[in-house]
């Protein structure tokens, strides 16, 4: 029986209109590496933020070892004092300072600092944790992994009992991950409890003792990692019990009889975003999908096809012709459209009007010296506002003042206006209301029946099963399988993601 | 019934008012009108324009308004470029004053050669103009590469030429201080026999070309798109780096024209004192025009009105016999007020106080 370090009980937290956490329990023992897993919106980060005092909880109790009564963390500083430290994916240290300065800055109450002493201390800390950095080295000269380790060392040196690592491996390569893991093991042996937030399944299996799975703000359960097969974990994260799903209706098969004309064909394509080379084909009138958990590389694949990331390997053929796509514009001119995953960051151009947002892609294809007249642009905008039922005061309204679903429709309109042969929709239904979701799915099927080839990516498996006729399954930045026809079931997808052949 | 009608009427009036107040040129025009009114008040003959004769007996138009229009030329032209640069790169080009010194230096060298008191033009003026513009565009390209390719903050990138420009200008003239022949002065003053100051004509041409370019190309749309969201712009087929670079080159072209007019005014150039502080006035004109200095807006007409507003302000301070050394202080005070009015904090304060704009935001929400 290990010593319990931290318990969170019956935690509730809601934001206006959303219940982010409902009745969530979480327990962490000394010397334990405990994974926190779940899909987007599962409540992982909310739980972490409640624990570290970024958010205040609505209800529930948090106990930490060494404090008799329930603690109420009001700020990250208070969390620090209680021994709870967080290291985020983005380094929150000062890159322009030295390693020593980063280790000790803000911790010394005295006016005078004995840097000589600090340097010595820093050296011993770095040595004991086997961090390959020198005390006097400027932090920005260290690799990301080492920077992260310095952040961890700082937390550990501040007597932290609970260390939260929020997606620390996302920007690390394999060797760096291995180094980070050995540091984590070292800390584990010292009795530190580590909460490891990640979406990499294999890494979780490699390093963690226990895993707590959240879904839709609710606790799914806590499991011993060694007793939980990967396929069951995937099922729990997606919220499906195995076997239950065999009889789901697959409406997506209406266009299974798509023509054999190939629109886009990728051979061994790989981009600088880390995806392993993959092959892919999209036929005329076919709806394909990329399935996989968050961060499995679904978006990276389609971004490589669209030229949004730099392609470093492989070939792309469009309608049988070899195409060199080095920029989105080249892809667009070849008849490809791409609705990006992150609507706010990559999709809308907030302060531009709905009209300008709709015509932008077609306009760039037409060229710098051939702008549409205002009446042409207005006609295009009105046409698609009507077709898609975009709710906006006028075509002049800035797109940022529209609701999420309507913003998404504006971007959809932008690409439909270019009449692409191949349209990529990356999470077109994320964060929008159910009515619009259904509309978009119907539209996808209609466009496909008219001959457009579409790739539809969604975190919601049902949506893909309803709309897609072929699924490419991904895990950890790699294509691990392809499912078609009767093979397209929730079970099969989960088994494929988990790498179990059945 | 009657009551209802009245309500509808007032609502109608309110929305018409709202339309005017919400128009993007409303604040810039109000500023300019305000300053003109003050001028008329302190100097009753302010608006009078008369036909006089210059020292050589040629007819020329005289009047305060003419002076303002004439003297604002360089500022208006620079404000046009600055608006584009600000919109695309979310920052400003602070080197424009110094690059005018470079342009001026190049022009003087071209038309004076190596002589200090040449008796004739050493090269046709058109050649000087073209080389001046090329020099300006080269400076713009230099800034543009630093900003667009190396992602250096505009103010830091342009600090280089801000610092070095005036010395480069002096070097371009070979260390001499030549005075060009009088015929070079036609472009900064009057063409004999034609009563309107040439700079005003040049301004009209440049402004006309600007609006023509904005109408006939996608410069405006692309610049704004890149300034608002360059990631998204890239995914729409734009090349943010290329567009930012282009705006800096255009800025350089504007510097070329402005430098030409400026050096023609007295037919000589002192690189170390030419157009002091004009870069700040140009930036201010952009801000006064209702453009966000954080990029993404492109209110060209506003910037031009802003430039005239500044010139009117300067002229007013001269009329009031404010000591030349004290002028910057007055300008600064007015700048603070004008800029503060446009900050979100103040806007928020007013929109919570003024029911009119409250109505507007509520409406927007309901519809959205």
Image (spheres, rainbow, N blue to C red):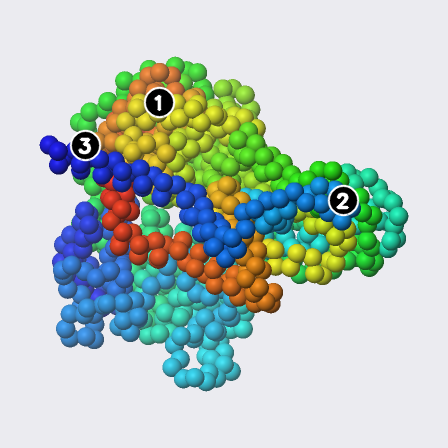
* Residue highlighted by disc 2: B57
Q: Which of the pair B314/B53 is nearer the observer?
A: B53
Tell me the crowding category of disc 3: few under 14, some 14 to 19, or many 20 or more residues within 10 angstroms, Cα based.
few
Kindly indicate whether the residue at mark 2 contacts the one at mark 1 (C-beta within 8 angstroms).
Answer: no
- Tell me residue A371's x, y (percent): 51, 27
* Residue highlighted by disc 3: A245
Quarter holding residue B353: bottom left
Mark 3 against mark 1, which lies toward the viewer?
Answer: 1
What chain letter is assigned to the residue under label 2?
A: B
Helix or strand or loop: what does disc 3 sit on?
loop
**Is the same chain shared between marks 3 and 2?**
no
Whether residue A108 can be seen here? yes
Does residue B231 appear left or right of residue A72 in this picture? right
- Quick check: B125 above or below A333? below
- Quick check: A128 above or below A377? below
Quarter holding residue B249: top right
Mark 1 against mark 2, which lies toward the viewer?
Answer: 2
Q: Which of the pair B18/A376 is nearer the observer?
A: B18
Q: Which of the pair B70/A92 is nearer the observer?
A: B70
- Quick check: B2 above or below A253? below
Residue at (44%, 40%) from the top-left corner?
A: B232
Tell me the crowding category of disc 2: few under 14, some 14 to 19, or many 20 or more residues within 10 angstroms, Cα based.
few
Of the numbered discs in the image, which one, if any, rests on residue A383?
A: 1
- Tell me residue A208's x, y (percent): 31, 56
- Tell me residue B239's x, y (percent): 54, 38
What chain letter is assigned to the residue under label 3?
A: A
Does residue A146 appear left or right of residue B280 in this picture? left
Helix or strand or loop: what does disc 1 sit on?
helix
Kindly indicate whether the residue at mark 2 contacts the one at mark 3 (C-beta within 8 angstroms).
Answer: no
Label 1 to label 2, Cα distance in Å?
A: 64 Å
Label 3 to label 1, Cα distance in Å?
A: 41 Å
């Amino acid at each position: 029986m290990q010593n319990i370090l931290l318990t969170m009980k019956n935690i509730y937290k809601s934001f206006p209109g959303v219940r982010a956490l409902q009745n969530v329990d979480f327990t962490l023992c000394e010397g334990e590496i405990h994974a926190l897993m779940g899909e987007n919106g599962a409540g992982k980060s909310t739980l972490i933020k409640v624990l570290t005092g970024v958010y205040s909880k609505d209800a529930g109790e948090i106990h930490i070892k060494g404090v008799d009564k329930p603690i109420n963390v009001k700020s990250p500083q208070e969390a620090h004092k209680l021994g709870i430290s967080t290291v985020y994916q983005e380094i929150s240290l000062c890159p322009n300072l030295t390693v020593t300065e980063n280790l000790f800055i803000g911790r010394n109450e005295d006016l005078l600092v004995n840097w000589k002493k600090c340097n010595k201390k820093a050296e011993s800390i770095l040595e004991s944790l086997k961090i390959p950095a020198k005390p006097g080295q400027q932090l920005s000269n260290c690799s990301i992994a080492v920077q992260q380790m310095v952040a961890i060392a700082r937390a550990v040196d501040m007597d932290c009992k609970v260390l939260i690592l929020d997606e620390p491996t996302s920007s690390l390569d394999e060797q760096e991950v291995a180094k980070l893991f050995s540091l984590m093991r070292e800390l584990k042996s010292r009795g530190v409890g580590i909460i490891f937030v990640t979406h990499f399944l294999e890494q979780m299996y490699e390093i963690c003792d226990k895993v707590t799975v959240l879904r839709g703000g609710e606790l799914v359960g806590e499991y011993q990692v060694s007793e939980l097969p990967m396929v069951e974990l995937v099922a729990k994260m997606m919220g499906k019990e195995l076997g239950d799903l065999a009889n789901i209706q697959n409406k997506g098969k209406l266009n299974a009889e798509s023509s054999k004309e190939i629109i886009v064909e990728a051979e061994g394509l790989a981009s600088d975003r880390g995806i392993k080379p993959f092959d892919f084909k999209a036929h005329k009138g076919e709806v394909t999908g990329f399935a996989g958990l968050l961060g499995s590389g679904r978006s990276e694949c389609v971004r490589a096809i669209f030229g949004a990331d730099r392609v470093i390997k492989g070939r792309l053929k469009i309608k049988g012709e070899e195409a060199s796509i080095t920029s989105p514009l080249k892809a667009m001119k070849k008849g490809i459209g791409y609705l990006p995953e992150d609507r706010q960051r990559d999709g809308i151009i907030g302060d531009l009007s709905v009209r300008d947002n709709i015509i932008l892609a077609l306009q760039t294809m037409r060229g710098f010296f051939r702008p549409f007249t205002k009446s042409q642009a207005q006609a295009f905008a009105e046409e698609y506002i009507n077709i898609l039922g975009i709710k906006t005061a006028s075509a002049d309204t800035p797109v940022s003042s529209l609701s999420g679903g309507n913003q998404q429709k504006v971007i959809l309109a932008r690409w439909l206006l270019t009449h692409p042969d191949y349209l990529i929709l990356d999470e077109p239904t994320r964060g929008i209301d159910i009515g619009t979701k259904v509309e978009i799915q119907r539209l996808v099927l209609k466009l496909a029946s008219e001959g457009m080839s579409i790739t539809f990516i969604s975190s919601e498996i049902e949506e893909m099963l309803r709309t897609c006729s072929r699924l490419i399954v991904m895990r950890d930045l790699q294509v691990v399988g392809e499912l078609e026809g009767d093979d397209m079931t929730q079970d099969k997808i989960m088994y494929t993601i988990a790498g179990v052949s059945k | 019934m009657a009551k209802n009608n009245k309500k509808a009427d007032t609502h109608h009036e309110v929305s018409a008012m709202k339309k005017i107040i919400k128009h993007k040129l409303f604040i810039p025009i109000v500023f300019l009108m305000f300053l003109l009114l003050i001028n008329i008040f302190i100097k009753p003959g302010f608006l009078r324009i008369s036909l006089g004769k210059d020292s050589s007996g040629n007819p020329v138009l005289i009047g305060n308004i003419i002076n303002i229009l004439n003297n604002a030329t360089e500022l208006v032209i620079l404000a046009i470029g600055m608006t584009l640069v600000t919109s695309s790169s979310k920052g400003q080009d602070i080197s424009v004053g110094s690059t005018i010194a470079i342009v001026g230096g190049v022009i003087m060298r071209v038309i004076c050669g190596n002589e200090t008191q040449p008796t004739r033009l050493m090269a046709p003026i058109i050649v000087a103009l073209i080389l001046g513009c090329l020099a300006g565009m080269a400076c713009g390209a230099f800034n543009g590469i630093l900003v667009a390719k190396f992602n250096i903050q505009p103010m830091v990138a342009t600090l280089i030429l801000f610092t070095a420009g005036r010395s480069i200008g002096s070097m371009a003239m070979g260390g001499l201080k030549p005075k060009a022949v009088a015929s070079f002065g036609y472009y900064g003053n009057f063409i004999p026999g034609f009563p309107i100051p040439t700079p005003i004509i040049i301004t009209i041409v440049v402004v006309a070309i600007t609006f023509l370019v904005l109408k006939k190309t996608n410069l405006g749309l692309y610049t704004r798109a890149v300034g608002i969201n360059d990631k998204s712009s890239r995914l729409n087929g734009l090349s943010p780096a290329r567009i930012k670079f282009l705006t800096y080159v255009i800025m350089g072209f504007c510097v070329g024209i402005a430098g030409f007019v400026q050096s023609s005014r007295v037919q000589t150039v002192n690189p170390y004192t030419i157009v002091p502080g004009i870069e700040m006035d140009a930036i201010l004109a952009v801000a006064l025009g209702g453009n966000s200095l954080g990029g993404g807006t492109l209110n060209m007409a506003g910037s031009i009105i802003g430039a005239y507003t500044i010139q009117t302000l300067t002229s007013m301070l001269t009329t009031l016999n404010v000591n030349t050394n004290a002028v910057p202080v007055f300008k600064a005070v007015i700048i603070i007020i004008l800029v503060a009015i446009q900050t979100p904090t103040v806007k928020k304060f007013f929109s919570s106080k003024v029911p009119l704009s409250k109505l507007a935001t509520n409406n927007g929400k309901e519809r959205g």
